[in-house]
Amino acid sequence: MTEEEARAWLDTQFDVSRETWDRLERYVAILLAAMDEQNLIAESTRPHIWARHIVDSAQLLRHAENAGEGEWYDLGSGAGLPGIVVACLSTRPVTMVESRRKRIEFLDAVIDQLDLKRARVFGGRVEAVPPTAAAVISARAYAPLPKLLSSAAHLANEKTLWVLPKGRNAQNELEAVRPSWQGVFHMEASVTDADSAILIAHAVKPVARRKGRA
């Protein structure tokens, strides 16, 4: 996907307003400028930032259209991908969970500069977030699926929709959790990378352990 195709995809999928375009363009500018101080995205993706990062994040919204009302939790937000993009393109409240100080400061500054009133940052580990029932949970580059589910289980209930971008090992990660976790899982193709997939899940919960015989 070229940068021009990425912008056309966004406009087609979301009918982006001038105000939202302005926010997205300012976010890209802030992101690139901050690269002089910290490594927020891979250097090799700079020329393809709209396709590789903005559209790659925005596509998650297409898979969350049927999620219930409530907050979107983005785990290990880092540079705000997908959290900031979701906050720009939707009206859903977004909480970005990030433990690294410089990333927290960056996210707070972006939220302030873009005036994203429905977005906030939780500065700390995922395990430290107070228990809740998120409507949607995303995690673009946070952890392999077994750790992701175990560390975030307290943020979800059976209605929570998980939208998790994964690479070419997506199926292997899913197989690795099947003995310990149950739910409705399926894969969707990524619009930006033929080798990647998006794992969609709901009704996720730990497999009940059978009690040993006395």
Image (cartoon, grey):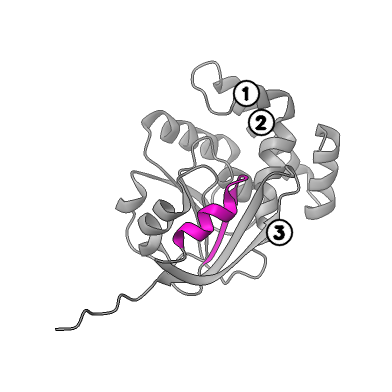
Tag 3 or tag 2, which sits nearer the N-term?
2
- Compared across the picture, whether 1 is left or right of 115 comes to right
Checking the image for residue 32, the label placed there is: 1
Residue closest to the eye, 12 or 159: 159
Q: Which residues are drawn in magenta? A: 161-177
Q: CA distance from mark 3 to mark 1?
A: 26 Å
Name the kind of residue labelled 2 in the image. Answer: Val
Q: Secondary structure at mark 2?
A: helix
Instruction: Looking at this view, name the residue that lies furthest to the top.
Output: 36
Image quarter of residue 54: top right
User: Mark 2 = which residue?
Assistant: 28
Whether tag 2 and tag 1 are in contact, CB under 8 A, the answer is yes
Q: Residue at 30% across / 75% down in the picture?
A: 209
User: Mark 3 = which residue?
Assistant: 62
Instruction: Check residue 176 for magenta coloring.
Output: yes
Residue closest to the eye, 170 or 9: 170
- Disc 1 crowd rating (10 Å Cα; few below 14, some 14-19, many 20+) is some
Q: Residue at 60% across / 20% down in the picture?
A: 33
* Residue 172 position within the rendered picture, expressed as x and y whole percent measured from the top left: 54, 53
